[in-house]
């Protein structure tokens, strides 16, 4: 290791230690946004902590590598809040040699320190990006996947700087693709063509072979541990989500993603980068960037918030792949465009450390998981959104047409139009307590006609075999359920409506056994 390589490694280690120390110093995890997404994460890691497998034991389109670094700590007895934080530390610790090697072998000068720093910050951030000053661990796997995508693209598309190792390059690229396959498949589908073309253009055949070998070895290991059925059920979960219209997209539509003011300048920078590289700065890299462009936009389209993190990869390729003045100016512009998002992620651990603890409360009562906190106002304050119906005939014209008033009907009963917008944790705790008091036993599970049905996290109930932590379609978990619960005000009416459609053929096998202000409970007969 040369002196410059040593300094880079020292920076990486120091940055990880500092950020991790600040993050863990709080003694727990405090979030103030995205309770639903966080509940989804918590259910999955707690199920995996119990020894369950994604797809085999519960339905999800997300792969096990998104959650494995966290679930190992849950399984070891740590609280879920600290486990999420330790999972991020474990992930970056495993990835740190890859970050160091990529920056040392591909990025010239002091830019290597910047790229390494941004990669580490993105792995350890406590917000998904954008510029909202909040703390949320929602969609942590998207941040991790973007870092792996950047490392893989840099190693495949950029020529080495005075040092090379086909083994290191191949292992890192292969590990990135394996993470995509067993984590977030959309990244793999999007980035694979550009990575393959980049390696072919550089004639990096040994790197390519080693990368394929890593993917194959990982797939074989998972098959040995989970069986062929793992892959069958995984594909089934992906197809279920692909055919569902419960959540057709995570944010902006395609037209807005291309032409809206927020995205227009970044997209123009991407087009300019392709033109500059193809017109002489680096034609081969320009071809790779041409293939990366749809990948950038597609992944951004299907990620919540539509944060264009690909700008950081664009800046990296333009700075390290072409030494011309115009390409480097464009690289600086791209870096400036994504800088607010990076700054938000960099500041988020400090923001978390400074949060006023008196304004937060533990979301769970069961030890050791009392180390997860959310804003008290967002737990005990329940807000609902529903259309107003005026009795006074003078205002009847404001009640909406028959087409607009389209209630959900089950067993002849019309449920009022309503959306719960706040108080998810408080409502779920109250329902879980009431179910236990009513007599639902610990060995029974409850199928819920809504996006979330994680009542077992809040009370002495059983997680439903095959049930989905986040509803995407079909009656996953219904067969294992002893009861079916209809919230009087669902978090996602569209999900409830789809479930009712699928449940209607079974309605004669269900009888009402309890009715409260929060839910109606049916028992299977």
Image (cartoon, rainbow, N blue to C red):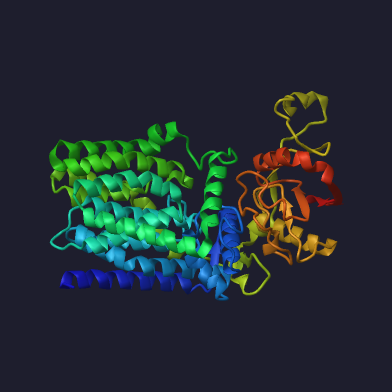
Mark count: 0
| Residue 204 in the image, given as x and y percentages of width and height | 21, 53
Q: In this rendering, would 147 be left or right of 501?
A: left
Residue 36 in view, yes or no: yes
In the displayed structure, 507 sits above or below 52; it is above
| Residue 375 in the image, given as x and y percentages of width and height | 60, 61
Give the residue at x 50% y 67%.
70
Q: In this rendering, would 6 be left or right of 83?
A: left
In the displayed structure, 210 sits above or below 278; it is below
Q: Nearer the viewer, residue 337 or 3?
A: 3
Q: What is the quadrant of the N terminus in the image?
A: bottom left
Q: In this rendering, would 308 be left or right of 52?
A: left
Give the residue at x 71% y 25%.
403
| Residue 319 in the image, given as x and y percentages of width and height | 20, 50
Residue 332 in view, yes or no: no
In the displayed structure, 123 sits above or below 341; it is below
Q: Nearer the viewer, residue 206 or 4?
A: 206
Give the residue at x 23% y 68%.
8
In the displayed structure, 21 sits above or below 474; it is below
Give the residue at x 41% y 44%.
299
| Residue 387 in the image, given as x and y percentages of width and height | 72, 35
């Amino acid at each position: 290791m040369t002196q410059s390589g040593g300094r880079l490694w020292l920076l990486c280690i120091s940055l990880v230690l500092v950020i991790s120390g600040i993050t863990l110093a709080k003694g727990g995890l405090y979030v103030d946004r995205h309770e639903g997404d966080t509940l989804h994460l918590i259910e999955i890691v707690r199920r995996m902590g119990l020894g369950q497998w994604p797809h085999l034991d519960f339905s999800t389109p997300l792969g096990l590598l998104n959650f494995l670094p966290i679930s190992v700590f849950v399984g070891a007895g740590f609280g879920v809040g600290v486990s999420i934080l330790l999972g991020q530390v474990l992930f970056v610790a495993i990835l740190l040699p890859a970050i160091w090697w990529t920056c040392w072998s591909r990025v010239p000068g002091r830019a290597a320190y910047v790229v390494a720093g941004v990669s580490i910050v993105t792995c350890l951030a406590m917000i998904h990006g954008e510029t909202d000053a909040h703390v949320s661990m929602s969609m942590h796997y998207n941040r991790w996947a973007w870092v792996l995508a950047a490392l893989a693209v840099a190693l495949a598309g950029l020529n080495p700087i005075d040092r090379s190792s086909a083994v290191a390059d191949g292992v890192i690229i292969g590990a990135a693709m394996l993470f995509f396959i067993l984590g977030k498949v959309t990244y793999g589908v999007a980035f694979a063509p550009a990575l393959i073309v980049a390696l072919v253009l550089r004639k990096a055949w040994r790197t390519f072979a080693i990368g394929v070998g890593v993917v194959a070895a990982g797939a074989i290991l998972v098959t040995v541990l989970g069986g062929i059925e793992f892959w069958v059920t995984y594909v089934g979960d992906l197809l279920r989500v692909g055919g569902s219209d419960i959540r057709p997209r995570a944010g902006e539509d395609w037209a807005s993603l291309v032409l809206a003011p927020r995205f227009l300048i970044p997209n123009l920078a991407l087009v300019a980068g392709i033109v500059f590289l193809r017109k002489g700065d680096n034609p081969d890299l320009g071809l790779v960037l041409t293939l990366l462009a749809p990948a950038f936009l597609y992944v951004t389209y299907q990620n919540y918030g539509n944060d264009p993190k690909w700008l950081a990869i664009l800046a990296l390729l333009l700075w390290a792949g072409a030494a011309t003045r115009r390409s480097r100016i464009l690289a600086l512009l791209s870096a400036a465009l994504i800088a607010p998002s990076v700054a938000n992620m960099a500041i988020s651990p400090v923001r978390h450390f400074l949060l006023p603890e008196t304004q937060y409360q533990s979301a769970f009562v069961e030890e050791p998981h009392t180390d997860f906190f959310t804003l008290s106002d967002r737990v005990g304050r329940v807000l609902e959104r529903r259309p107003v119906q005026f009795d006074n005939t003078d205002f009847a014209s404001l009640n909406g047409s028959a087409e607009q008033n389209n209630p959900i009907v089950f067993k002849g009963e019309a449920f009022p139009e309503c959306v719960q917008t706040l108080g998810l944790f408080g409502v779920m705790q109250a329902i879980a307590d009431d179910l236990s008091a009513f007599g639902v036993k610990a060995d029974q599970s409850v199928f819920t006609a809504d996006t979330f049905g994680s009542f077992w996290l809040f009370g002495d109930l059983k997680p439903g075999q095959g049930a989905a932590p986040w509803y995407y379609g079909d009656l996953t978990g219904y067969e294992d359920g002893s009861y079916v619960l209809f919230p009087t005000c669902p978090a996602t009416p569209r999900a409830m409506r789809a479930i009712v459609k699928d449940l209607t053929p079974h309605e004669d096998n269900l009888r009402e056994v309890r009715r409260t202000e929060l839910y109606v409970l049916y028992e299977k007969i």
